Amino acid sequence: MSPSSDEKPSREAAELLGFSTGQIVQEIGYDDDVDQDLREAIEDSIDDDLEDEDCQEIVDGVILWWRDGDGDLVDALVDSLTTLAAGGPVWLLTPKPRRDGHVLPATIQESADVAGLRAMSSVSLAEDWSGTRLASRQG
């Protein structure tokens, strides 16, 4: 059976994140506005559930849902590195322009710099969400 038209874009977006079967991915900033289809596609790609913010094991990657008004982005980025394996990506997911909670690219860049990260790429991941891949400057 072929995927529905709604599932295919989510699956393709999840593939852009680069996670694979067996990896452990932590999700931070979950709320009722996140894109559920994208979440499910990520879980399908790793063949497991996403770990919540209380996860204490070393993770292969982090998905950080972030909206303007959520607090201090630098603090959130630093916290996201706590259990991240060396070289693992932090995917910062923010609302697209003209959506509630949109975060300016300059804010993302400044916050990443202060947190010791660098923005590697940005992609459209869902109807309302964009993703910015952040990597450690040491990596």
Image (cartoon, rainbow, N blue to C red):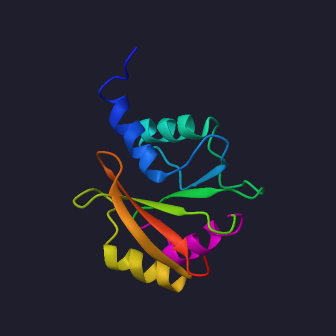
Quadrant of the snapshot with the C terminus: bottom right
Residue that sits furthest to the top in the current view: 1
97 horizontally vs 45: left or right: left
Instruction: Find out whether residue 80 is within the magenta segment.
Output: yes
Q: Does residue 56 appear anywhere in the picture? A: yes
Residue that sits furthest to the left in the current view: 98
Q: Position of residue 56 (x, y in %)?
A: 77, 57
> Which residue is found at the position 49% from the left and 73% from the top?
73
Residue that sits furthest to the right in the current view: 57
> In which image quadrant can residue 61 be found?
bottom right
Q: Position of residue 31 (x, y in %)?
A: 50, 48
95 horizontally vs 79: left or right: left
Quadrant of the snapshot with the N terminus: top left
8 horizontally vs 139: left or right: left
> In which image quadrant can residue 99 be found?
bottom left
> Which residue is found at the position 69% from the left and 56% from the top?
59
Q: Does residue 34 appear anywhere in the picture? A: no
What stretch of residues is rendered in magenta? 68-84
In the image, is residue 79 above or below residue 99?
below
- Total marks drawn? 0
In the image, is residue 109 above or below residue 39?
below
Q: Position of residue 67 (x, y in %)?
A: 41, 62
> Which residue is found at the position 35% from the left and 32% from the top?
8
Q: Position of residue 65 (x, y in %)?
A: 48, 57
Instruction: Find out whether residue 37 is within the magenta segment.
Output: no
> Which residue is found at the position 58% from the left and 58% from the top?
62
